[in-house]
Image (cartoon, rainbow, N blue to C red):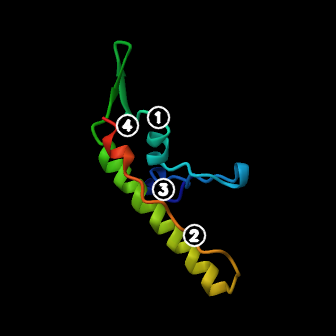
Amino acid sequence: MLPSPKARVLRAPQLSGARSGHSINLHQFARDGVVLLGRIQSVQDGMILLAPDLMENLARADKSEVDQVKMIDGFIEKSGIAAPQESLPVLRVGYNSR
C-alpha cells in the first residue's frame, strides 16, 4: 500500500514529547551508557549478526535530525509562528561505541 518501493525504507522521525520533551538522539543513548551495536543483519544458528554500517547509520541519523529541524524552523518562520529557536546539541559519543 506504499506509494513506491523507496517508501519502504523511509522511516518516521523519532520524536519525544514525554516529560516536556527530551532527546532520543542515538549519541545521547551512548552518553547515557547504551552500547550501540547497529542493526540486525540476520540471525544464524542462534547468533545475531550485526551489519557493519553503524557509523554510516549514525551519520545519516545526524543529517536527518538537522534537516528535520531546518524544515520545521522554515515552516515556523514562513507561518509567522512565535516559537523559541531550537538548539541541537552536537553529540558524537555514539561514534565511539564499538
Q: Is residue 76 left or right of residue 93?
A: right
Mark 4, residues whose alpha carbon is within 10 Å: few (<14), some, or many (≥20)? some
Q: Residue 14: give x, y in percent of width and height.
A: 57, 51
Sequence-first tag of 2 and 4: 4
Tell me the residue at 55%/55% (across/down). Answer: 13
Q: Is residue 86 left or right of residue 83?
A: left
Sequence-first tag of 3 and 1: 3
> Which element is circle 1 on?
loop
Instruction: Read off the residue under disc 1.
Output: 33
Q: Quadrant of residue 98?
A: top left
Q: Quadrant of residue 21?
A: bottom right
Q: Residue 92: give x, y in percent of width and height.
A: 37, 51
Instruction: Read off the residue under disc 3.
Output: 7
Marks 3 and 1, how far apart at CA: 33 Å
Tell me the residue at 48%/46% (across/down). Answer: 28
Count of marks placed on residues: 4
